[in-house]
Image (spheres, grey):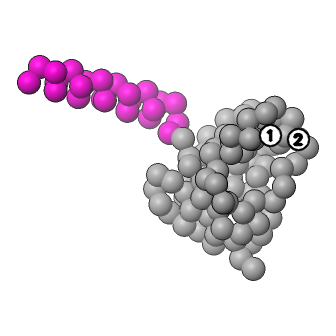
């Protein structure tokens, strides 16, 4: 059985072999997920949200220790979480894009208040 990962907000889907990490699946889909450690669970930058019902392999000890309780919120490390079937992943905006989006939203609100 093949795995299938859909990344949001892009909606891009990629088929992968079971056991593929979400980080490798994102790279295959040509989607950036930030990481400084090269996928060794050392930097915590590749944190993603997995939607309910997603089929992932059980969380590893190292990922469990790194997340220290966040895994109950469907938060996973893309470099460690491995595909078991169909998976839906929300990739957060990188910090710079998120800051720009917040600033643009503030400016739009201010414009709307003036009119």
Residue at position x 56%, y 46% in the image = 91
Q: Residues within 10 Å of mark 2 (few under 14, many from 20)?
A: few
Q: Is residue 84 left or right of residue 111?
A: right
Q: Is 46 located above or below residue 2 in the figure?
A: above
* Residue 27 visible: no
Query: Whole-Å distance between the Cαs marked 2 and 1?
Result: 8 Å
Give the image quarter of residue 103: top left
Q: Which mark is residue 62?
A: 2
In this view, the residue in front, 51 or 107, is 51
In this view, the residue in front, 87 or 10, is 87
Q: Which mark is residue 41?
A: 1
The secondary structure type at the circle numbered 1 is loop
Image x and y of residue 39, in percent: 76, 45
Image x and y of residue 28, in percent: 62, 63
Q: Which residues are magenta?
A: 93-115
Give the image quarter of residue 26: bottom right
Q: Quadrant of the C terminus?
A: top left
Q: Is 65 located above or below residue 6 in the figure?
A: above
């Amino acid at each position: 059985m093949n795995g299938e990962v859909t990344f949001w907000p892009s909606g891009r889907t990629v088929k992968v072999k079971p056991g593929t990490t979400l980080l490798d699946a994102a790279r295959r889909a040509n989607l950036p997920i930030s990481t400084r450690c090269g996928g060794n669970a050392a930097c915590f930058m590749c944190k993603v949200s997995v939607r309910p019902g997603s089929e992932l392999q059980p969380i590893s000890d190292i990922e469990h220790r790194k997340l220290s309780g966040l895994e109950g919120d469907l938060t996973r490390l893309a470099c460690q979480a491995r595909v078991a079937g169909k998976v839906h992943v929300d990739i957060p905006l990188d910090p710079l894009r998120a800051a720009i989006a917040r600033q643009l939203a503030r400016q739009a609100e201010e414009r709307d208040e003036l009119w």
